[in-house]
Structures are given as structure tokens and as C-alpha cells.
């Protein structure tokens, strides 16, 4: 029986590239493995895969009774819906420890770094397996994406070291230049519906029994949203009601200004204001220096919902 490798719902580049990389590693070690995804890939990830000659992983949403390896999350809300009926044999993740549990011991690679692919690189080193040129390419891109080209406060010396080594294997002379090319792709909004934009990088979080959804759009120029913020806010409210959520937030992150505008739909906006010690204006607030949802947003919200 094959081992299925999958990342979180609404996959990003780290989720997809880590699944492909772990599947390659397992197959090299003699374990039949298949890279999977739970949903459609975003434009940035499509650019990365096409640039280095990879097909998209297969789409698979049901894992009951399947041997499964989870990448880039340990939160039940982000895992496949039937993950508790699967045989989870391993995880690799760089987020806080979530609420996924297993009935048997498992292989666990969890490190406080900026990207799951940094940890996957360490897995290759541990097993002494060489990384092919094209695989090193997508792993480099995933780390550049997750660390916002090394600007994110989640970025560590392990991430920069991994990019240096992977870029050398991949023949990438200027990783930062490639990172900017990726973020220009990520900044493209024309042709996408409002709902597609809101859901492009969206995650639900269980905060002490309160359901909070948080999306993020990272761009090189925030002005592209000037004429659509009202529509985005309207869709956040629709999404909040549809999913019976307490709050739905959208971070519009400007990687050049190194900050984010937070759009808010909430049953109690005072909790959101308390989390960041700022008053909102028309359901919006500017968060200077905020680039990371994982480190600079979620922990502060969890405190006020605890």
C-alpha cells in the first residue's frame, strides 16, 4: 500500500513542495510514496512547478485507512477531514504543535524555522540522500515564499543556510531575484474573483473553541487593492456567516513596506482591537512590521480568545 504525502487544506507553496520532496525521499528510501494535495494550487505555486518541470500532485481529500504523512501542519482543522481514520505515520511542520493525535508512534520532524522545506532539507541530510537539481529548485522557492525572501520574523539562520545550499544545487545564482519574481506572480489579482483572492491563502483556527478564519495576500504594492477593499470586506462577512465563524480576517501584506493592512469581519471587533492594541477604522487597521500570520497574528488572537 502506498504512503500518501499531503499538506494542509488550501495548499501554499511550502505545503505542495514539501509533499513532493518528502515523497521523493521516501521513494528513494524504498517506500512507495505519492505526493498529494487537498485543493487547487495558487498562481505562485503553479509558477514554481512549471519553472522546474514538475506536475501538480494528485488531488486527494479522503485518507481513511491510508498510510499518511502530513506536511506543513499538525492542526486538525487544516488536515484532511477524515485524518483521524487514517494511519498517520509521520509529520513535518514548522508551526506550533496542533491537536492532531495518533494511535501509534510516528516519525515527527517539527522545528521552529521559517519553512517546512528547511526541515525536509535536514531530512535529506540525515538520510544521506542527494537532492536532484529540479527538486532543490522548488524547495528553494518554497523557503523564499514562506520567509518572505528572508524578511519574515520567522526566518532563521537554518532557512538562509538551506537556501544557500539548495540554490547551489539548483543552479540559482540570485535567490532573492527569483523571490521577487515569485512575489510579482503572487501579486497578480486581475482575472481572480474576490472569493478566490480571499481564499488564496486561508486557514481556519480553533481558538479555545472559537472558530477564526485568517487569510493573507502578500504583494509588492498594496495599492492594487485600493478599489476592491469594500468588496473584500463584504466577502469576509459572507464567509464568516457561511462558516459559522466568530471572525474572518484578511491580511493584505506589503512586502516592500514590511507591514500589513488587516481587514476585519467579526462578531466582536473589540477582541481584534485588543489583540493588536489598536483601534480599527471602517473595519481596517494597519499593522506596521507585521509579515507573519503564524508568529505575529495568530498568537495574539489566541490570547484574547482564550
Image (tube, rainbow, N blue to C red):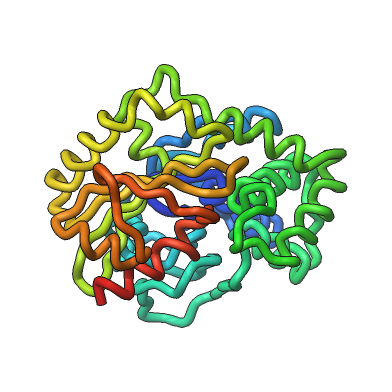
Locate the C terminus by quadrant. Answer: bottom left
Report the residue at 50% width, 59% height from top.
72
| Location of residue 170 (image quadrant) | top right
Quick check: 159 above or below 173?
below
Percent x, y for residue 219? 53, 36
Left or right of 183? Residue 121 is right
Is residue 87 rendered to the left or right of residue 42? left
What is the tally of numbered marks visible in this picture?
0
User: Residue at 26% across / 29% down in the picture?
Assistant: 231
Q: Please say if 49 is above or below 215.
A: above
Determine whether 177 is above or below 5 in the image.
Answer: above
Q: Position of residue 99 (x, y in %)?
A: 34, 74
Does the image show residue 34? no
219 and 57: which one is in front? 219
In front of the other: 276 or 53: 276
Query: On the rendered structure, is 277 left or right of 105?
Result: left
Give above or below for 213 relative to 74: above
Q: Taking the image as drawn, is residue 12 in sight?
A: yes
Residue 103 occupies quadrant: bottom left
Image location (x, y in percent) of residue 271: 24, 65
Q: Residue at x 51, y 55 (%)?
A: 290
Q: Position of residue 194 (x, y in %)?
A: 31, 28
Depth check, front residue: 168 or 112: 112
Determine the residue positioned at 69% across, 62% down. 29
Quadrant location of residue 160? bottom right
Amino acid at each position: 500500500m502506498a504512503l500518501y504525502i499531503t499538506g494542509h487544506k488550501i495548499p501554499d507553496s511550502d505545503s505542495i513542495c514539501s509533499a513532493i520532496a518528502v515523497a521523493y525521499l521516501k521513494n528513494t528510501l524504498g517506500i512507495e510514496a505519492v505526493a498529494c494535495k487537498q485543493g487547487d494550487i495558487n498562481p505562485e505555486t503553479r509558477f514554481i512547478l512549471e519553472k522546474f518541470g514538475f506536475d501538480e500532485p494528485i488531488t486527494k481529500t479522503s485518507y481513511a485507512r491510508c498510510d499518511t504523512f502530513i506536511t506543513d501542519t499538525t492542526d486538525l482543522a487544516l488536515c484532511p477531514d477524515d485524518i483521524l481514520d487514517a494511519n498517520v505515520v509521520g509529520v513535518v511542520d514548522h508551526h506550533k504543535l496542533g491537536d492532531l493525535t495518533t494511535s501509534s508512534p510516528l516519525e515527527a520532524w517539527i522545528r521552529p524555522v521559517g519553512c517546512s522545506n528547511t526541515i525536509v532539507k535536514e531530512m535529506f541530510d540525515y538520510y544521506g540522500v542527494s537532492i536532484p537539481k529540479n527538486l532543490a529548485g522548488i524547495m528553494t522557492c518554497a523557503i523564499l515564499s514562506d520567509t518572505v525572501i528572508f524578511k519574515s520574523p520567522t526566518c532563521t539562520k537554518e532557512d538562509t543556510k538551506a537556501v544557500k545550499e539548495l540554490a547551489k544545487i539548483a543552479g540559482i545564482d540570485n535567490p532573492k531575484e527569483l523571490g521577487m519574481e515569485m512575489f510579482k506572480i503572487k501579486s497578480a489579482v486581475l482575472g481572480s474573483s474576490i472569493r478566490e483572492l480571499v481564499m488564496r491563502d486561508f486557514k481556519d483556527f480553533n481558538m479555545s473553541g472559537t472558530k477564526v478564519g485568517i487569510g493573507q495576500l502578500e504583494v509588492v504594492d498594496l495599492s492594487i487593492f485600493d478599489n476592491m477593499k469594500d468588496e473584500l470586506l463584504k466577502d469576509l462577512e459572507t464567509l464568516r456567516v457561511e462558516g459559522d465563524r466568530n471572525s474572518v480576517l484578511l491580511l493584505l501584506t506589503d512586502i516592500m513596506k514590511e507591514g500589513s493592512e488587516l481587514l476585519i469581519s467579526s462578531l466582536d471587533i473589540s477582541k481584534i482591537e485588543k489583540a493588536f492594541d489598536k483601534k480599527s477604522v471602517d473595519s481596517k487597521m494597519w499593522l506596521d512590521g507585521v509579515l507573519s500570520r503564524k508568529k505575529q497574528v495568530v498568537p495574539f488572537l489566541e490570547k484574547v480568545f482564550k
